[in-house]
Image (cartoon, helix red, strand yellow):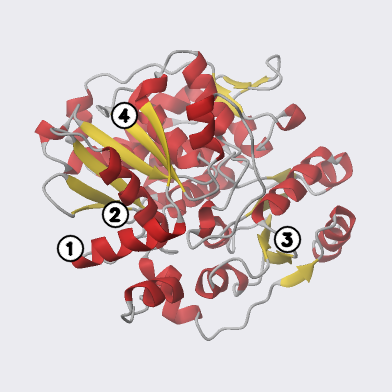
């Protein structure tokens, strides 16, 4: 698989190198120069999840990994379902929260962990990543206990739901968690500084597990195929997919699926008030504003890292501008959408509610709508209970950590303080 750095075109790498490196030179993202469509989509859609996903990932990765290795990685990583639940005849939810940390990022996190375990040849690696919620838990659980891999997770102190936080701050061992006194964008900026610092990057053998890592992104392509496989065949080609969007990895993966031939008519990029992309799609001007805290806090991102990949597919003509619509949903309409779903017998959390509201605003007659449910509502128990006025039961993974003590350490929003902390805890 030939991958090019979108900022430094002369840097070209294969898939294992991209997975181990994470970010390219000048913080550029690795991405294929072009995608080759899949053959016989209908036959693929008839296969079970693991078998179909293996075929898709073999097609994308090519000869960079042995077929048997890809088969083993997929079988280990995708050992839980992605379910489509119908809200009405026209509207459905793809539930991506049936994995071990109850969030869509289990797909990408587990796939990446298995890839690294297979290609690292025993060398020591430090995974450094920032999280606005779900990434931290998915990455921590995916890498917990793996030999020769340390994980450092930065998160904005006090800006993640307590139960979400407990999922990744209570593990210990090779999982090191750091509460930064700022917002998610500041955490991302610290990660980028570390990758630009040769002493840290080379000395700690840095890698990142954010959705900037190509392995996570490719894994996410697979569940779009799984969604279409569960819908009636007459929905194909009439499907509108609404994606709750923060760092925009999820939407990038959906567009890749469409480029590969999956019959999706168009996408809605649904954001909260941190609406850099919807404004850009409307005006053509990239004007990030200061990040605002919202109910859908995993989407509180003003400078989404994955947008250059979508921009590349737009520039190459692989997707048309008319096939992506941006929509901002504010706090009031987020809560209204949660209540509307509850009236239809479906309990949802704020991120999916943003996607549902955006979908229902733009779904046209004759179209079929799908919105992504990216996290179990219990991960946002306080918000959901406050909005709906009814108790939410805790599923097993959350009940198990609710009473545990957080092991996270507080660090100022200061790069030198973070650097010193990392060398101290990693013993380098």
Report the quarter where the C terminus lies: bottom right
Please tell me how crowded label 4 is: few (under 14), some (14-19), or many (20+) other residues with Cα within 10 Å.
Answer: many
Real-space Cα distance between discs 4 and 1?
A: 25 Å
- The residues tagged by marks 2 and 1 sit, at their Cα atoms, a distance apart of 23 Å
Whichever of callouts 2 and 3 sits on the residue coming sooner in the sequence is 2
Which residue: 53% across, 43% down?
275
Q: Residues within 10 Å of mark 1 (few under 14, many from 20)?
A: few
Residue at mark 3: 182
Name the residue nearer the viewer: 358 or 96. Answer: 358
Q: Which residue is mark 1?
A: 344
Q: Residue furthest bottom?
A: 403
**Mark 3 vs mark 1, CA separation in Å:** 38 Å
Q: Earlier in the sequence, mark 4 or mark 2?
A: 2
Tell me if label 3 and label 1 are in contact, CB under 8 Å.
no
Residue 68 in sight from this viewpoint: no
In the rendered structure, find residue 125 and report the number of the disc placed on it. none
Give the residue number, with chain letter if any, for mark 4.
266
Label 4 or label 2, whichever lies nearer to me, is: 4
Left or right side of 222 for 311: right
Q: CA distance from mark 2 to mark 3?
A: 35 Å
Q: Residue at x 41, y 60 (%)?
A: 332
Q: Which residue is mark 2?
A: 81
Q: Residue drawn at (35%, 75%), measured in percent from left and top? A: 395
Q: Tag 2's secondary structure?
A: loop
């Amino acid at each position: 698989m030939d991958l090019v750095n979108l900022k430094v075109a002369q840097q070209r790498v294969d898939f294992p190198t991209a997975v181990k490196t994470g970010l390219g030179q000048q913080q550029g993202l690795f991405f294929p120069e072009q995608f080759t469509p899949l053959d016989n989509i209908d036959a693929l859609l008839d296969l079970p999840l693991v078998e179909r996903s293996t075929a898709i990932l073999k097609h994308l990765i090519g000869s960079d990994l042995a077929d048997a290795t890809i088969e083993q990685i997929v079988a280990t990583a995708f050992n839980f379902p992605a379910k489509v639940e119908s809200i009405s005849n026209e509207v459905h939810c793809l539930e991506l929260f049936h994995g071990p940390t109850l969030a869509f990022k289990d797909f990408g996190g587990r796939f990446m962990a298995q890839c690294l375990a297979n290609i690292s040849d025993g060398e020591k690696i430090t995974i450094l990543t920032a999280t606005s919620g779900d990434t931290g838990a998915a990455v921590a659980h995916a890498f917990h206990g793996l030999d020769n891999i340390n994980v450092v997770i930065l998160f904005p102190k006090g800006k993640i739901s307590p139960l979400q936080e407990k999922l990744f701050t209570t593990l210990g061992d090779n999982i090191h968690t750091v509460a930064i006194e700022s917002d998610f964008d500041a955490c991302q900026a610290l990660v980028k500084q570390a990758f630009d610092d040769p002493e840290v990057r080379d000395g700690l053998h840095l890698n990142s597990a954010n959705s900037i890592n190509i392995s996570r992104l490719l894994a996410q392509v697979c569940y779009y195929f799984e969604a279409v496989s569960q819908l009636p065949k007459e929905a194909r080609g009439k499907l509108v997919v609404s994606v709750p969007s923060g760092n925009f990895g999820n939407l990038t993966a959906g567009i890749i699926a469409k480029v590969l031939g999956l019959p999706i008519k168009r996408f809605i990029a649904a954001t909260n008030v941190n609406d850099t992309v919807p404004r850009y799609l409307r005006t053509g001007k990239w004007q990030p504003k200061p990040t605002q805290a919202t109910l859908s806090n995993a989407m509180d991102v003003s400078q989404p890292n994955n947008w250059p990949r979508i921009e590349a597919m737009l520039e190459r003509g692989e997707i048309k501008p008319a096939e992506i619509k941006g929509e901002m949903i504010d706090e009031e309409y987020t809560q209204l959408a949660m209540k509307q779903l509850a009236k239809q017998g479906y309990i949802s959390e704020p991120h999916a509610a943003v996607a549902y509201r955006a979908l229902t605003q733009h779904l046209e007659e004759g179209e079929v709508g799908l919105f992504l449910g990216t996290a179990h509502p219990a991960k946002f128990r306080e918000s959901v209970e406050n909005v709906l006025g009814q108790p939410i039961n805790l599923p097993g993974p959350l009940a198990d950590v609710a009473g545990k003590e957080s092991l996270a350490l507080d660090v100022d929003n200061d790069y030198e303080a973070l650097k010193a902390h990392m060398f101290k805890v990693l013993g380098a």
